[in-house]
């Protein structure tokens, strides 16, 4: 049972800005209503510029939250794009490895990089939701499907299974205070979709936002990011990928098909498609490029027997489930379920 929750800003410092105060207040109340004691780590509310300019403080917040025995769960405020800059402050002297403890860690988007950091030091984590994007939803409540998984995680410390959402929502474009209580437009959803390969497969899941993963190998966003990732060996060795399931979801930037192809090619060059047991693909936000992405996956991976399952309600499309990393998952598309061996 989760009681004490720490909120960290490991990428962007958005939650410290006045323009989101109404959202943050909603989120705090919801967490309190769930029976949680909420603590913002010392630098989480310092604002965008401060957080951007002080990666060492972001790293310190994470280390403090991991080391504090009273904290049960670490919830990431939001994503961003430069959490890789924490690497020297977490790995130069084994700081992260020394701080790791048995806690729940939840985040998505650029937090993908933090998940890989924690995987490197042997910590199991949870992918799929964040404080600002999910708990602070402007509707009268959290989105029901999203809330179901969040409540399961805080009440049990685990996720037993994931099933598809019956609906999906268009992304919110206006987060102003006048939008509080305004529902999102929604559409019927159609369940998990087997693109190719066997309908049942198993393995531990690892992955995240393909935009952030592509930045491991491509320096267009930050020229030094591939250098940092290589220096600290952030992308797992090929032996670590054997039998795993790769999770890929795409960001609100709605990566062009041309860039998506390059990102999948970069992953192919690592050799992981020859050793993993399957791939899970998150529903793209607003279903943008959904058909183009599917075709690219089939064409570029060029491995017809490798299972690929699309339309998982994870990542930037709403609503969002939560997927555990580091535990064996069994994907069963015939029965439209992903089960986890907790």
Image (cartoon, rainbow, N blue to C red):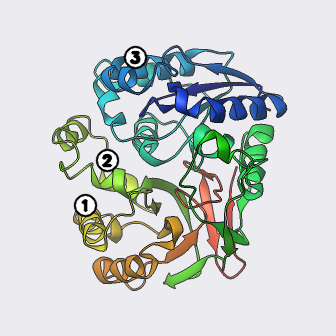
Which residue occupies the foreground of this view, 70 or 255?
A: 255
Q: Is residue 196 above or below residue 108?
A: below
- Residue 219 relative to residue 324: left or right: left
Residue at label 3? 57
Q: Find residue 235 and name its label.
A: 2
Near mark 2 (Cα within 10 A), the count class, few <14, some 14-19 or many ≥20, is: some
In terms of image quadrants, where is residue 34?
A: top right
Location of residue 22 in the rendering, given as x and y in whole percent from the top left corner: 65, 32
Q: Is residue 166 visible?
A: yes
Location of residue 54 in the rendering, given as x and y in whole percent from the top left corner: 34, 19
Residue sitting farthest toward the front = 178
Label 1 vs label 3, nearer the camera: 3
Residue for point 71% across, 29% down: 28
Which residue occupies the foreground of this view, 54 or 18?
A: 18
Q: Find residue 270 and name its label.
A: 1
Q: Quadrant of the N terminus?
A: top right
In contact (CB < 8 Å): disc 3 and disc 2: no
Q: Find residue 4 and name its label.
A: none
Q: Is residue 130 visible?
A: no
- Residue 78 relative to residue 275: left or right: right
Of helix, strand and loop, which one carries label 3?
Answer: helix
Give the spatial CA distance, label 2 vs label 1: 9 Å
Of helix, strand and loop, which one carries label 2?
Answer: loop
Residue for point 43% across, 57% down: 251
In contact (CB < 8 Å): disc 2 and disc 1: yes
In contact (CB < 8 Å): disc 1 and disc 3: no
Location of residue 3 in the rendering, given as x and y in whole percent from the top left corner: 77, 25
């Amino acid at each position: 049972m989760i009681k004490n929750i720490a909120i960290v800003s490991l990428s962007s410092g958005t939650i410290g800005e006045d323009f989101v105060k109404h959202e943050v207040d909603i989120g705090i109340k919801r967490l309190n209503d769930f029976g949680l004691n909420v603590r913002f780590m010392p630098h989480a509310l310092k604002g965008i510029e401060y957080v951007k300019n002080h990666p060492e403080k972001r790293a310190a917040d994470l280390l403090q939250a991991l080391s504090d025995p009273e904290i049960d769960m670490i919830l990431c405020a939001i994503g961003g794009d430069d959490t890789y800059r924490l690497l020297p402050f977490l790995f130069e002297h084994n700081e992260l490895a020394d701080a790791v403890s048995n806690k729940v860690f939840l985040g998505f988007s650029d937090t993908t990089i933090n998940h890989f950091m924690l995987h490197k030091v042997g910590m199991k984590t949870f992918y799929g939701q964040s404080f600002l994007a999910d708990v602070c939803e402007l509707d009268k409540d959290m989105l029901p499907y999203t809330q179901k998984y969040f409540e399961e995680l805080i009440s049990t410390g685990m996720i037993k299974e994931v099933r598809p959402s019956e609906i999906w929502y268009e992304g919110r474009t206006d987060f102003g205070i006048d939008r509080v209580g305004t529902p999102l437009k929604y559409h019927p959803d159609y369940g998990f979709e087997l693109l190719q390969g066997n309908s049942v497969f198993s393995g531990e899941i690892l992955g995240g936002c393909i935009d952030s993963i592509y930045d491991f190998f491509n320096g267009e966003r930050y020229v030094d990011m591939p250098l940092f990732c290589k220096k600290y060996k952030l992308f797992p060795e090929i032996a670590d990928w054997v039998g795993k399931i790769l999770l890929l979801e795409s960001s609100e930037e709605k990566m062009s098909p041309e860039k998506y192809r390059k990102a999948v090619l970069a992953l192919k060059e690592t050799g992981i498609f020859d050793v993993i047991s399957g791939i899970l693909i998150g529903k793209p936000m607003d279903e943008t490029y959904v058909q183009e992405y599917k075709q690219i996956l089939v064409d570029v991976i060029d491995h017809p027997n490798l299972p690929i399952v699309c339309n998982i309600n994870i990542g930037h499309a709403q609503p969002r489930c939560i997927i555990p990393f580091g535990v064996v998952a069994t994907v069963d598309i015939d029965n439209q379920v992903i089960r986890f061996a907790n």
